[in-house]
Amino acid sequence: MKITNTLTGKKEEFIPINSGEVKIYVCGPTVYNFVHLGNSRPAITFDAFRRYLEYCGYKVTLAQNFTDIDDKIIIKANEEGVDSLEIAERYIIQYWKDSMALGIRPANFHPRTTHYVDEIIDFIEDLIAKGYAYISEGDVYFDVSSFDDYGRLSGRKLEELIAGARIQPGEKKRAPEDFTLWKAAKENEPYWESPWGKGRPGWHIECSVMSTCILGKTFDIHAGGSDLIFPHHENERAQSEARYGKPFARYWMHNGMMRFAGSKMSKSMGNFITIKEAVKKYGKDAIRYFVFSKHYRSPIDYSEDLLQEAKIAVTRGNQILDDFEQSLGEKQPFAKKTPWVSEKITEFKTYLDDDFNTPKALALIFEMINEVANASEQLRRLEAFHLVRNEFGPVLGIFDLPESGHFDIDGLVKILIDLRDQFRKEKNYKKSDEIRDRLMSLGIKLMDTPSGTKWSF
């Protein structure tokens, strides 16, 4: 397997620290508002990458944080007259809902900044003791000039950063390029006690602390959007390697931005669509198809036309698979791995081993769906069906069946169909129509046929 390592700018063979195990940290959201579709790209991409690693036999430990204390959260809390943690909790709950709607599996760990303040203080104290950080009137800053390798991740030279940097009003740092580790408390802000007085963590320090506490001082992969390379990931790397004197992450993976009319999709710019709106309009599979249709490192332009095309493609694909499954009658396990199946699995892995090339993997999935629809031999159709439902689909999270132990949607809908049938027998058509209409509002269509009521998404 080869992945492009942002740190070196090269496509490199992936060799984990411990054989058979992979530890990944993905930067998560700052929870002050609804998550938009652009935010979903790293979540969807690295959810699928994790799935693929597991498909290849690795034991994966994934950590993704919640930034639950930040200027934007504080501003919103003050506007609403509530505690900042109430704002954070509200949007963390919404994030879970959005993630479930997109088929994104939870990480093994979802640490929150406010749960790691003691560890953050210890980290900063160590940086001060080692000469990498300094105190200035209750604030604490990282001295960029003290870390010789600064700028390597982003490809920026310190001289250029110094020339372009400015000290903002209220900042008390020695040099414009230095960054904040600890912020002294201002009026109407939450705070924690520290050796430097009342205050709160800076943005960059939280990820260094949470990632190393959970995954170790050096771990395999640090991932996130390309907009985080500088300054966030550059600063994370500097402060972590300054403290521990060893590499922070072995590989850095960054996805390209989702753009809206050529500009980065952003809440601050108002050019976004929320995940909730997007899922309601296009569906989970169409959004994942749209994301995987471009290589993860390339920018992707939001387009209603492209998402509508994706919706049509996945709807047709699901219908072909559903029709074929129903034609099989009594379900039988597919246990035989024929040479053709093995060949296609090898092809699928070849694509994803090459810097996680999802466009080619997606094309192969649709090639298999075409085999299900048009192959002349029943065995070939069954082989292709197996590959989509049980091999390739679960890796990308599209066209896949619910995993064992997950919620039985079919059973629930059948209970409601039985209840509707009972109302119809009692000539209570108002109630029976209400069940039909409410299911339709959730995207579930009932169809009355001579052989009984059927349903579909």
Image (tube, rainbow, N blue to C red):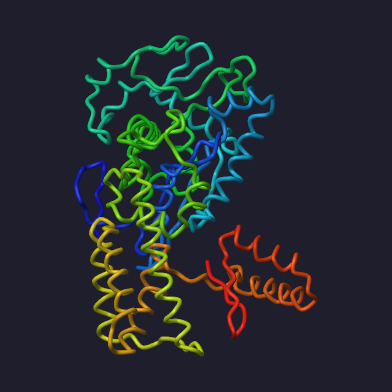
- Residue 333 visible (yes or no): yes
**On-image quarter of the N terminus:** bottom left
- Residue 246 visible (yes or no): no
> In the figure, residue 13 lies in which quadrant?
bottom left
The residue lying at 36 percent from left, 88 percent from top is 336
Residue 335: image location, x then y, percent: 40, 87
Nearer to the camera, 82 or 300: 300
> In the figure, residue 350 lies in which quadrant?
bottom left
Residue 327: image location, x then y, percent: 45, 86
Instruction: Please give left or right for residue 52 compared with residue 343 in the image.
Output: right
Residue 145: image location, x then y, percent: 30, 21
Residue at the outermost left position: 10
The residue lying at 39 percent from left, 34 percent from top is 236
Q: Is residue 296 above or below residue 171?
A: below
Residue 257: image location, x then y, percent: 33, 40
Nearer to the camera, 4 or 371: 371
Nearer to the camera, 85 or 271: 271
> In the figure, residue 368 lies in which quadrant?
bottom left
Counting every numbered tag in the picture gives 0
Instruction: Please give left or right for residue 123 compared with residue 236 in the image.
Output: right
Instruction: Please give left or right for residue 270 compared with residue 366 in the image.
Output: right
